[in-house]
Image (cartoon, rainbow, N blue to C red):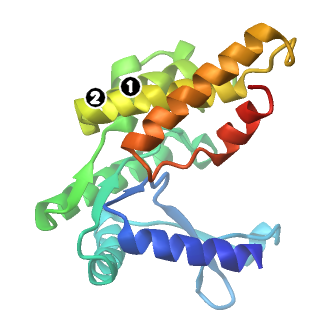
Amino acid sequence: QRMNGSQKAAHLFLKEARWLVLTPGTAFHYLLRNTGDPVANCHKAPAKDFEKKLLLSGEIIGLFEELILKLKEFNPRLNILFTISPVRHVRDGLIENNRSKANLIEAIQSLMDTHPQVYYFPAYELVIDVLRDYRFYKSDLVHPNESATDYVFEVFCRTWLSREDESLFSQVKEIVQAAGHRPFHKNGADYKDFASSILEKIATVEQQFPFIEFSREKSLFLESA
C-alpha cells in the first residue's frame, strides 16, 4: 500500500511539476542472459545470469528521446534538467568509467540541441575539473564529501535560483536546521523563547508561501513554546 501510495503521489506531483532533475551515473547496463531483457536490479542473483553492456551515446539518445516525448505529452510545461553524477564507478575500471561518463555527456548535449526544454548543470565537471583534489572525497576516494557537495549545491543555487528564491531558501534552511537542533534543556526558558521565535518565522514564511509544508517543524516547536 505504501509503495502504491508513493507511486500515485509521484504521478500527481509530476503532472504539475515545472522541473524534473535527472542524474544518470553510468552508461553501463545489464541484460538477463536467458531472455536478453534489460534489468533494473539483480536481486542478488548470480553474476553469470547477466551480461554487462556499455551503451553508446546514440543508444542513450534514443532511450531519452522516448522518455522526453512521453513526458512532454504527460506534462507539456515540464522542463528537464540533467546532471551527471560525479561518483566514479571505479569497479567498472577507470578507463571504462571515463568512457561511460563521456557517452552520457555526449548524449545529453545532443538532446539539448534538439529539445529546448532540456538543460544541463555541470555537477560532474565541478567536482572532477574545478575541485580536482582528493581532499574533496570521502575515505573511499570515490564519493564526494560534504565540502564538495556543499560547493556544488552553492553553485547550483547561484545558477538556478532567483534572488527571491535564495532568500526563501535561507529562511527555510534556518527553520529546518533549528528543528534538527537537540537542546539540553528542552523545558528551559531560553529554549521556549527560541521555539517561539522559530514559530514566528514559520508563520511569516507560510503567510508568503502557503504551499510550503511545515507540519513536522511546527509540531516539534509547539511542544516547547
Quarter that holds the C terminus: top right
- Please tell me whether residue 146 is drawn above or below residue 216 in the rendered image: above
| Residue 115 at x, y percent in the picture | 16, 67
Q: Is residue 48 visible?
A: yes
- Please tell me whether residue 220 is drawn above or below residue 104 in the rendered image: above
Q: Which amino acid, by three-letter code, is at mark 1?
A: Glu
x 21%, y 63%: residue = 111
Q: Residue furthest top?
A: 190
Quarter that holds the N terminus: bottom right
Categorize mark 2 by other alpha carbons within 10 Å: few (<14), some (14-19), many (20+). Answer: few
Q: Quadrant of residue 127?
A: top left
| Residue 164 at x, y percent in the picture | 27, 33
Q: Nearer the viewer, residue 185 or 157?
A: 185
Left or right: 22 in relation to 190: left
* Secondary structure state at the residue bearing disc 2: helix
Q: Is residue 138 visible?
A: no
Left or right: 79 in relation to 134: left
Q: Which amino acid, by three-letter code, is at mark 2?
A: Arg
Q: Nearer the viewer, residue 20 or 212?
A: 212
| Residue 12 at x, y percent in the picture | 48, 75
Left or right: 220 in relation to 26: right
Q: Quadrant of residue 145?
A: top right
| Residue 77 at x, y percent in the picture | 24, 69
- Report the Cα–Cα distance between label 2 and label 1: 6 Å
Q: Are circles 2 and 1 on residues that touch, CB within 8 Å?
A: yes
* Secondary structure state at the residue bearing disc 1: helix
x 43%, y 52%: residue = 100
Q: Which residue is mark 2?
A: 158
Q: Nearer the viewer, residue 66 or 10?
A: 10
x 24%, y 76%: residue = 76
Q: Which residue is mark 1?
A: 154
